[in-house]
Image (cartoon, rainbow, N blue to C red):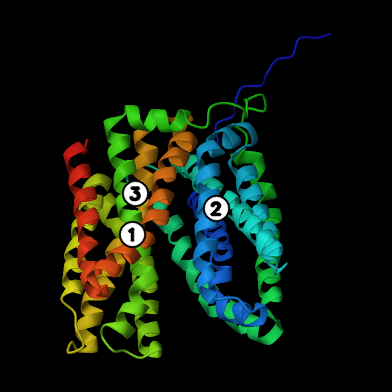
Amino acid sequence: MAAHHERPPVTPKPLSRLALILLVAESTAVQALVSLAMLALPAIAPKLAAELGLPSSLVGFQISIAYGGAMCTSLVAGSLVRRWGAVRTSQIALLAAAAGCLGLTAGWLPLMALASVVLGFGYGMVNPAASHMLMKATSPANRNLIFSIKQSGVPVGGTLAGATLPPLALAFGWEWALVAVAMVAALLALALQPARTNWDSDRDPNARLRGSPLSGLKLIWQSPRLRALSVTGFAYAAVQLSVSTFAVTMLVSDLGWTLVQAGVLLSALQIAGIIGRVGAGGVADRWFGGARTLVGLGVLTGITALLTGLMGPSWPALAAFAVMVPFGAASLGWNGIYLAELAHAAEPSQIPRITGASLFFTYGGVLVGPSAFAALHGVTGSYTATYALAALPAFVGAALLARRRA
């Protein structure tokens, strides 16, 4: 039998401007679609709850279950990217999102819980795969901006969920709204197939999928810089999700706004998040660098959180917007730069593993943050006061990163 000779990995050719735009568009679309799938059930929760006779508050548990699944696959995504390639891993993530949405249509709680885990599995694969591709296609001059544009897919997905799924659920039924998301995700997975020729050429078909899922966490903890980035990601994520989760309730309960008025400000927060992510990436590349910009965003988040604590019923709407919109831009704007800094700090072959392991901390912040916020509200009795307390993790994360900044 002839000896088997493994073909060496092929390095993708330098990208033209058009090819880079296409890569960023594809990566952002994958992020947006998987984020849309994650937020699909919350977007139609009132309609679903009314038809199934369930409390709509159960959607909070569904999100937690999904992020728990994301924490699991984020630890092994590096091995998947190495074995199958970044594009194939992205396709699997999209198909997992599609399968999760279809499973949610069952309307039976145990199966819906399992479907939520599958959704989370897909979500946890996206960033390690995208970071692997984008790091090879970017330079220090544009890395933070490119990563931030890609991360704008998260609020874009949230905006799409709020704008499209409730009307679909009302017109055709909540099940068909979920089916529509599944179909679009599956179509995007199919559309990515031609990209495999170039971007999966560096995969190692003989790479082992088995191995310690904790090896990435060990690499994180052995590096002071990666450890600081990861703990800061935990702190910033905890604040970020709390901003989005409790803003409407705070405005209605503590400031006496109508639900419609509060919804307008929530939409402004999401738009500020999109602009904040892209704008912060540009600022990092042009002037301050990634680490300094992350520290600045944490400080701005802390200051605006403290100002939110001063808000009351006597505040005019314009003043509330003047505080909450920068709060949203800062607290939602850090993710792309954080991923770019992780990729920059890691060995090229370890980027997917390091990214996935660090996101384990970030998803942990997503799980802990809203629960801690709710518990603190039980003590303070005020949402505005609880937002002021949210300044603490933002300042701590910024201080930790400033101390370890390379």
- Secondary element at image label 1: helix
What is the number of the mark on residue 95? none
Q: Earlier in the sequence, mark 1 or mark 3?
A: 3
Residue 375 point in image, percent of width and height? 32, 63
Q: Residue at x 66, y 70 (%)?
A: 178
Write down the quadrant of residue 372 in the picture: bottom left
- Secondary element at image label 2: helix
Of residue 188 and residue 398, the one placed in the foreground of this image is: 398
Q: Residue at x 66, y 48 (%)?
A: 92
Residue 233 point in image, percent of width and height? 33, 48
Q: Which residue is mark 1?
A: 372
What is the number of the mark on residue 123? 2
Q: Residue at x 59, y 49 (%)?
A: 121
Query: Would you place residue 89 above or below residue 303 in this image?
Result: above
Q: Which residue is mark 3?
A: 234
Q: Earlier in the sequence, mark 3 or mark 2?
A: 2
Query: Would you place residue 342 above or below residue 239 in this image?
Result: above
Classify mark 1: residues with Cα within 10 Å, few (<14), some (14-19) or many (20+): some
Q: Specify the farthest residue to the front.
A: 379
Q: CA distance from mark 1 to mark 2?
A: 23 Å
Give the foreground label among 3 and 2. Answer: 3
Of residue 103 and residue 52, the one placed in the foreground of this image is: 52
Residue 119 point in image, percent of width and height? 60, 56
Q: What type is the residue that disc 2 sits on?
A: Tyr
Q: Residue at x 40, y 89 (%)?
A: 260
Q: What type is the residue that disc 1 sits on?
A: Ala
Q: CA distance from mark 1 to mark 3?
A: 13 Å
Classify mark 3: residues with Cα within 10 Å, few (<14), some (14-19) or many (20+): many
Do the CB atoms of the residues marked 1 and 3 lie less than 8 Å apart? no
Q: CA distance from mark 3 to mark 2?
A: 17 Å
Q: What type is the residue that disc 3 sits on?
A: Phe
Q: Earlier in the sequence, mark 1 or mark 2?
A: 2
